[in-house]
Amino acid sequence: MTAKYDAGLHAVARVREVRERDSRHGLTTAISDHATVETGVRTLETQLAAQPGFVSGSSVTYLADRTHALAMGEALIGRREDLRVSASVMAAATAHWRADRSRLEAVSMLLERRAEERRAERARTEATHLDDIATQGWLRRRQGMDEAVDA
């Protein structure tokens, strides 16, 4: 029954539902991506911390170990930057989803309020109609009593 009322608002609600669902999906993707990057950072940090220091050997071995450690350090710096960017993306996705959710809730509340107003109006109309019927019955009984007294 509510479909015939507020058809335009129901269309807006459907669009808002789709947008909220899409932004929620984007948020879950951003969270997942952030977790993946965070795991990569932790892995590189662990590997770099576990890297043994140079104890002895040739200068070639020292140079190879040093180059490997520097490459891991550079990779870690890059992954930390990726982590910072993914945190920003996740924050933006969260804000976007919250905005879409609040817009959907606003439309839903408006639809509920309008439905409640229609229910209240129907109840008032029905009460008025029942009052009219009761009044007519009272008048008929009253007329019947007046006619019985006259007879």
Image (spheres, rainbow, N blue to C red):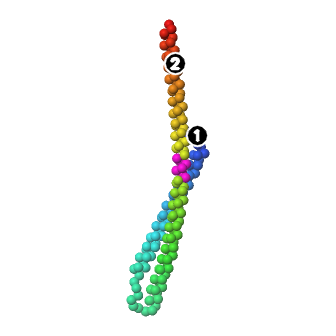
| Residue 79 spot, x, y in % from top left | 49, 74
Residue at far right of view: 8
Q: What residue is shown at x 43% (from left), y 92% (from top)?
A: 58
Q: What residue is shown at x 53% (from left), y 43% (from top)?
A: 113
| Residue 120 spot, x, y in % from top left | 52, 36
| Residue 139 spot, x, y in % from top left | 52, 18
Q: Are marks 2 and 1 in contact (CB under 8 Å)?
A: no
- The magenta segment is 103-109
**Image position of 26 with respect to 3: above or below:** below
Give the class, few, some or many, for how many residues have Cα within 10 Å of label 2's Cα (few <14, many ≥20). few
- Badge nearest the viewer, 2 or 1: 2
Q: What residue is shown at x 46% (from left), y 70% (from top)?
A: 38
Residue 107: in magenta span: yes
Q: Say which of 79 and 58 sits in front.
A: 79
Q: What residue is shown at x 46% (from left), y 73% (from top)?
A: 41
Q: Which residue is mark 1?
A: 4
Q: Which mark is residue 139?
A: 2
Residue 124: in magenta span: no
Mark with earlier residue (2, 1): 1
**Image position of 95 with respect to 15: above or below:** below
Residue 49: name its quadrant. Answer: bottom left
Mark 2, secondary structure of its residue? helix
**Image position of 89 with respect to 51: above or below:** above
Give the amino acid at mark 2: Leu
Give the amino acid at mark 1: Lys
Q: Quadrant of the N terminus?
A: top right
| Residue 77 spot, x, y in % from top left | 49, 77
